[in-house]
Image (cartoon, coloured by chain):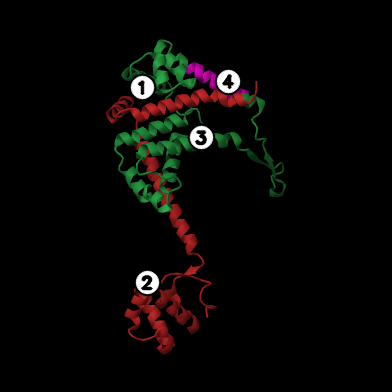
Amino acid sequence: MHARDTGALLLTELEVKRAISALAPPGWLRLHKAARAFSRNAHFDAEDLLQEAFERALDGSRQCSRTLDIVHFLVGVMRSIASDWRKARRRRPEMSLVSPTGTLQEVVIKVRDERPAADEWLASTQEAICLRQTILDLFADDDVARRMLEGIMDGIAGEELRSLTQLSQTQFESKRRLIRRRIDKAFPQERKP
Amino acid sequence: MTRNKDSNQQAPIDRLIEALVEDILATSDADLVNEAQADDDNGATVARRAFERASRTIALRRLAGNRRSARGRRVVGANIRALDPKTARGWLEEYMASHPDAARKVSGERSPRDRLSDEDVYGMLEALQKRGVLKERAADQGSDRR
C-alpha cells in the first residue's frame, strides 16, 4: 500500500481534535474510567495518563485509523503509555545529588543500581500477592464472581471464561459489571486494581 | 525462586485491569451515566480538563517550534533595500522562474534580466512582498548567489 493510501486511512491531527472535542459525556466518562483502571496499582495519576494520551493523539505521534472509534483508539494509547511508564519506572536509575560541603564543585552524582534491591523485589511481589487475595476476598459471598475473577487472573478469557462460570452471555456481562463496580467502590483511589 | 516471578505476580493484576477496561468499553452510555450519578463521579469533567490542558500544551509546543524555526531566517520585505543589487536581482529572477504567471502581473512585458534597473528590482520585490507572495528566506541565502 502506498504512503498516500495509508494516509487517507488515518485521521488528521485536526480531525482527531474535532472527534475528541465532540465527545458526549459518556465518552469522557469512559475515558476517565479506563484511565483510572490503568493507573491503579501504578505510580501515576489517571489525569496525567489521560493528558499524555491526548497529547500524543493531538501531536500525531499516535495515529488513529478512520475505521476506529476514537474512544477505543485513546484507550489503546493509554494502555501503551501505562505499560511504558511501568517499564520505565522499573528500569529508571534514580540519581541523587550529594554535596557534603554544600559547594557546587564537590557535588557527587550517585547513580543507583537499576536492578531492584532484594527487599524491593520481595515487597512488590508480596504486594501483588496480597492485592490478589484482597480482591478475591471482596467476593467471599459470591462463588461465581470469585470463580470468574480467578479465571480472569489466570489468563482465561472469552467463551472459555464464560463456560467456566456456567453463565449465559447476559448473566456473564452482568457479573463482570458487578465485579468492576465492587472493585471500584472498594478501591476508589488510584494505585489499586 | 527467580526475579522473573516478580512480573509473573503482577500479571494476574494486569489481566484483571484488562477485563475491567473491556467491561468499561462494553457498558452502555446510559449505564455509565447512571453509575456516575450514583457514585457522584466527576470523571467526565476531569477527562475534559486533561484534554484542554493537552490542547494548550500542544499549541504552546507548536508555537515554540515555529519560533525556533524562524530563528536564523528573515522576512525579505523587512529589509529589502538592505540587499545588495546583485542579490536582489537574483532573488527576483528566481521568483519569476518559479512563478511566471504572478511575475508577469508585476513586471508586465518587461524582462527583468535585461531591462530592469536596480530601483525596478527593489520596487518589484517590494510589490511582491506587499502581495504576501515573497517567502521567507534563510539568512544565509542571497549574498553569494550569483
- Residue identifier under label 1: A177
* Apparent colour of chain A: green
Give the residue displayed 35% in from the left and 83% down from the top.
B107
Residue B101 part of the magenta segment: no
Distance, label 3 to label 2, CA atoms, is: 48 Å
Distance, label 1 to label 4, CA atoms, is: 28 Å
Q: Residue flagged by tag 3: what amino acid is it?
A: Ser
Precedes in sequence: disc 4 or disc 3: 3
Residue A55: give x, y in percent of width and height: 43, 45
Residue B115: give x, y in percent of width and height: 40, 89
Quadrant of the frame with the N terminus of chain B: top right
Q: Mark 4 touching mark 3, by CB under 8 A? A: no
Q: Mark 2 touching mark 4, by CB under 8 A? A: no
Q: Mark 1 touching mark 3, by CB under 8 A? A: no
- Residue identifier under label 3: A83
Q: Which chain carries label 1?
A: A
SS type, badge 3: helix
Q: Residue flagged by tag 1: what amino acid is it?
A: Arg
Precedes in sequence: disc 1 or disc 3: 3
Which of these two is toward me, B6 or A64?
A: A64
- Residue identifier under label 4: A126
Q: Which chain carries label 3?
A: A
The mark found on residue B133 in the picture is: 2
